[in-house]
Amino acid sequence: MNKVNIGIDGIKRSQVADEKISKTITSLFETPSGREVLKYLRSITIEMVNGPNVTDAELRHMEGQRFIVGLIETRVEHGHRSRNNERIPS
């Protein structure tokens, strides 16, 4: 039986399932096209600065977008770490 843990996204799932999600996302976003897409998403979310006239609703919307892009970036990093920690069969 697989151990259930809390994943990067706060969802309970086995470590194997969590690593699989990260490795899949890493495979997608480590391609040249994937890197360009992530660069674009980052530019319109994390790097976006709001002025003083932003409404509460607009700010909440932007923070949700930032969270998702940050989660993708964290998954990519986790996917790389998971790959590096895999044991090579003897």
Image: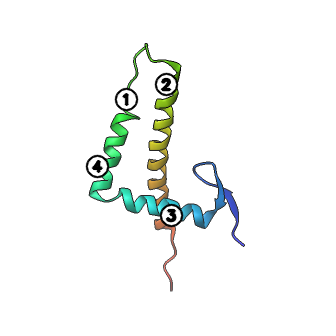
Residue 59: give its label.
2
Residue 82: give its label.
3
Q: Is residue 79 above or below residue 88?
A: above
| Distance between mark 3 and mark 2 Cα atoms | 34 Å
The residue where tag 4 is placed is 36
Near mark 2 (Cα within 10 A), the count class, few <14, some 14-19 or many ≥20, is few
Give whichever of discs 2 and 4 has the lower sequence position: 4
Amino acid of disc 3: Ser
What residue is drawn where x is 48% and y is 49%? 74
Q: Residue furthest front?
A: 57
What residue is drawn where x is 63% and y is 48%? 10
The residue where tag 1 is placed is 48
Give whichever of discs 3 and 4 has the lower sequence position: 4
Amino acid of disc 4: Glu
Near mark 1 (Cα within 10 A), the count class, few <14, some 14-19 or many ≥20, is few
Near mark 3 (Cα within 10 A), the count class, few <14, some 14-19 or many ≥20, is some
Give whichever of discs 3 and 1 has the lower sequence position: 1
Q: Is residue 30 above or below residue 68?
A: below
Give the structural element (helix, strand or loop) at label 1.
Answer: loop
Give the structural element (helix, strand or loop) at label 3.
Answer: helix
Amino acid of disc 1: Met
Can you tell which quarter of the image residue 29 is in? Answer: bottom left
